[in-house]
Image: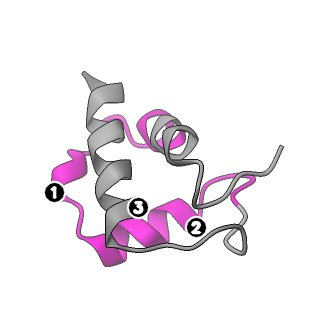
Amino acid sequence: MNYGWNDVQRIAEQLAEAHPEVDPYSVGFTKLQKMIRQLPEFDDTSGRVGEKVLEAVQTLWADEID
């Protein structure tokens, strides 16, 4: 099932699974967008990306790792 920018929890879960060794807060927003776009089944055309979305993803990703 595809998911997009509005699915920040799912994005965070997928990032934690794909990159468990990465500190989410060490990833800049440009790199984070690229990492998200490379996730399986991610639909880049669904929703809008912005700083608030990326900040939410980072926070939730950090929570997933803890």
User: For the residue marked with disc 2, what is the amino acid?
Assistant: Arg
For the point 79% across and 51% down, the residue is 2
| Rendering coords of residue 66 (x, y %) | 24, 21
Asked which secondary structure carries label 1, the reply is helix
Measure the C-alpha gap from mark 3 to mark 1. 16 Å
Asked which secondary structure carries label 2, the reply is helix
Q: Which residue lies under the disc numbered 3? A: 53
Name of the residue lying farthest toward the right? 1
| Rendering coords of residue 10 (x, y %) | 57, 39
Give the mark nearest the N terminus, 3 or 1: 1
Give the mark nearest the N terminus, 3 or 2: 2
41 is within the stretch colored magenta: yes
The quadrant of the picture occupied by the N terminus is top right
User: For the residue marked with disc 1, what is the amino acid?
Assistant: Ser
Q: Which residue lies under the disc numbered 2? A: 37
In the image, taking residue 51 as reference, residue 33 lies left or right, namely: right
